[in-house]
Image: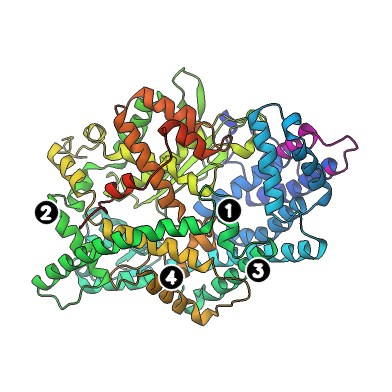
Amino acid sequence: MSTADDNPLFSPSTLPYGLPPLDRITPDHIVEAIEAGLVAQREEWDAIATDPAPASVDNTVVALERSGQLLNRALTIHWTQSSSCIDDVVTDRDEWLAPTLAAHTDALYLDQRIFERIDAVHDQRDTLAEDPETRRLVERIHTDFVRAGAALDGADRDRLSALNRQLSEAGARFKRLLVDGTRANAVHVTDVAELDGLSEDALASAAASAEEQGLEGWLIPLVLPSGQPSMSSLTDRRTRRRLHEASVTRCLGGPHDTRPVVAQIVGLRAERAALLGAPHHAAHVIADQTAGDADTAIDTLRGLVGPATANARVEAAELEALLLADGEEGPLQAWDWAYLAERVRADRYGVEEEALRPYFAFDAVLRDGVFAAATDLYGITFVAREDLPTYHPDVQAFEVVDHDGEGLGLCLIDPWSRPSKRGGAWMTTLADQSALLGGQPVVTVTHNIPRPAGDGPALMTVDAVRTLFHEFGHALHGLFSDVTYPRFSGTSVPRDFVEFPSQVNEMWGFDPAMLARYARHHETGEPIDPAVVARLEAVGTYGEGFATCEYLAAALLDLAWHTIPPGRAVSPEDVEAFELDALAELGLDLPWIPPRYRTTYFAHIFAGGYSAGYYSYIWSEVLDAELVQWFGENGGLRRENGQVFRDRLLARGGAEDPMAAFEAVRGRPPTLTPLLERRGLTGTA
């Protein structure tokens, strides 16, 4: 057994802000610390359960909050590696860990001795908990136990544990199959003529990807969503079709087939929901979200289907006319849409995506855009810290300094795509803020921008710029956390609220004043033409029929899978038919618009935390559209507005009811109207 002297995870980090000593941690350290942390936390839980003193907030609820610090340090490193530094060692550890953690979690939530103490404190919370945050902690932890099955009888608790173990194993298996299947479906091209339309830096990136895999020519790796970034640029219709079909057939048969795992997960989740007293998995999940119940979430989404499909059909007719005018054979296909829509944008609005990329060099977007907007709104500044260790050479570390000159936390930026990183973009924490444990935040922002070729800058698409602002909104949620208990820190809010702050932050990416500051040609320094900025605003609602439909198809497909009642099985062979039938019933079986994620590669719901929760993006956008209006009504990018948003929403994390906090700022409950107006879904396209 190691000690703190030779395993750096065995004691709290002494680096600034508790940054883990990432340069000293080995795979053996992680496994050893996880194993020791599991034992240590079980001992902490046992001490709570056997405490002879009457149950109190301090010796029961707060004691639970204090437990597991060694395990949390080790798991933080593992989770970072399992998404950003994937190799066989990490994947094997992930699959070992999934059932181990499921059993460990059950050991807490199904321990009747601890639940009885929690129940006793909950019964007396108005007298035992002296402040609102502590009362909310008691209520939330009691709810956690009940929802996890603590009130079940012995036989049902045993069955629940078995289900949780099987689900954790299946989720890890889905993740491995998806990573391997996505890598295997990358499109290999040996004739550069087939890649006509790609920019020089995109070609260089594809050539580098091929070289990394020992291949001649060019390799276009797949990103996680159905739509691939290159589709808007490739002029060769056959190449577009290859890329589209490679994307949407991922893990649909062959050695990386995820359908058996999907069928297993759906069945197990339905059975678990029934054990917990819910009619289906979605009902169980959404009962603890701000939406309140599955019907509300479904009805909200269904309310958008009609306007979205009407707009999409108008858009499709226009694109098909353009396709036929080019002398191509109809009808319009899914692999034509992005390419033709890009031409419409260029012709109608004078905005060509590829022509804008030279104005969006990554370093300028980050420092003069993302960071500068945060400085204007919140008074925080950023200092590069090249002296601090990171988990990969690509990662850049920044110290975040508050408006009063005090250090606030650290932000690690991991921008470039690489074979060892899963697709997409995300924010995580390496250390959480809490007054109880004395922690300050260390957050990460991860993107998948093609690595720059040679010494040139990385040039970003408009969508990549928007994504960077979005993920930094999550980072701000973590950095501004000002709570007592770890349970409420940063983004620890209901799933259908967590996207709200990040979506609000997107607005600054294309604010005309901000664009004028950061969008400059990387060679000439010339600022982007104000007329282009105006056209960017005008083009904003073009294509929202497509964008809304592809999102709704995925979100409602998630809910279709998770409203299957217990006892109804879907065989692996029927997975694709179930998907098609569900989309047809919803009126979203549009031939040109696949779901943003098809079932076989829908990582959010089968290997992530969004099962029966993908609706939360649009739910959060309803709130976001309202707050964007609020900012506009109050003068926009002003420190006063930023301070209100920070103090009354971002800083409170889960310590207050999020909808109550939202309504206190907005002055009323949210409505759909601002979102419909933003997406141009109030009339014809």
State the mark number for residue 287. 1
Q: Residue 272's x, y, as percent?
A: 66, 65
Depth check: 602 or 125 in front? 125
The Cα–Cα distance between marks 4 and 3, rounded to whole angstroms, is 34 Å
Q: Which circle, 3 or 2, is nearer the viewer?
A: 3
Q: Which circle, 1 or 3, is nearer the viewer?
A: 1
The Cα–Cα distance between marks 3 and 2, rounded to whole angstroms, is 53 Å
Q: Which circle, 4 or 3, is nearer the viewer?
A: 3
Circle 1: residue type: Ala
Residue to which mark 2 is pinned: 348
Determine whether label 1 and label 3 are within 8 Å by CB: no
Residue to which mark 4 is pinned: 184
Determine whether the residue tagged by mark 1 lies in a helix, strand or loop.
loop
Circle 2: residue type: Arg
Residue at 50% over, 40% down? 659
Depth check: 404 or 614 in front? 614
Residue at 59% over, 30% down? 483
Q: Which residues are magenta?
A: 49-66
Q: Residue 622's x, y, as percent?
A: 39, 46
The Cα–Cα distance between marks 1 and 3, rounded to whole angstroms, is 17 Å
Ranked by sequence position, the earlier of labels 1 and 4 is 4
Q: Identify whether 646 is placed above or below 190.
A: above
Residue to which mark 3 is pinned: 271
